[in-house]
Image (cartoon, rainbow, N blue to C red):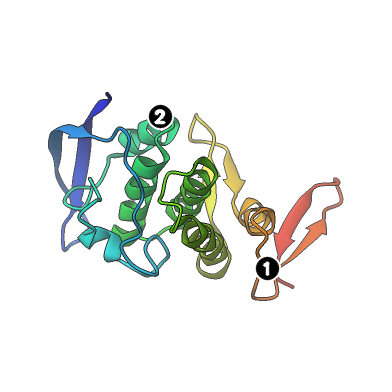
Amino acid sequence: MKTWLLLAAAVGISGCYDRASYVYGENLDGLTLQLHGPDVGIHPDQSVLEDPNNPFALSSPGEETKWQIQGSGDHVAAFYAWATLLARGPYGEAQFYTATDLVAVYQNGEASQEELPLVRAQAIRAFQSVLDNFPDAVTYDATGTIPYELLTPAYKGIVDLGGTVQGGWVLVQTADGQERAVKP
């Protein structure tokens, strides 16, 4: 059984970070996703902060902790970590990883059989939110210096799940032969 030491920083009214708070012994192993609302994990919804199953509802994961959880293979815990960050301070990387973790939950059956189709639909909508709300979204390599755009993988995520990309986005081939999602 994995037990994580979580470092969480609370954002104050001024936008500055307060002192970090520590949550000891929070068990993140073997969580099952139960969607708390119809838009949980999709910007601008904040219902994840009221979800009784969210281990981060009272404190956000820290900068390093979110990556440790993401890399742990615990997709439900990673979903809650990223969705909490998205609700508290929306940005494209958090929306993208929320979507990615919903896909992993769906593919690995980490929700009830009845909810799996809803999780798939939620993942499609979360990827669409990257396109609609965060067109400049990037993530970085392990050094934190090389950015990677997230529009193209979000577009492909929708298609891979059998969804239809909305909003006029198309996939084009660049001069160097790479595919890129654009909105003409």
Residue 52, quarter of picture: bottom left
Name the residue that disc number 1 marks.
Answer: 164
Q: Residue at x 25, y 50 (%)?
A: 54
- Residue 89 in the figure: left or right of residue 160: left
Using the image, determine if residue 30 lies above or below residue 127.
Answer: above
Q: How many marks?
A: 2
The answer to which of 73 and 148 lies nearer the viewer is 73
The span from disc 2 to disc 1 (Cα, nearest Å) is 31 Å
Using the image, determine if residue 79 lies above or below residue 142.
Answer: below
Residue 155, image x, y percentages: 66, 58
* Mark number displayed over residue 72: 2
Residue 4, image x, y percentages: 24, 29
Q: Amino acid at mark 1?
A: Thr
- Of pointers 2 and 1, the one earlier in the residue sequence: 2
Residue 43, image x, y percentages: 41, 66
Q: Residue at x 57, y 37 (%)?
A: 146
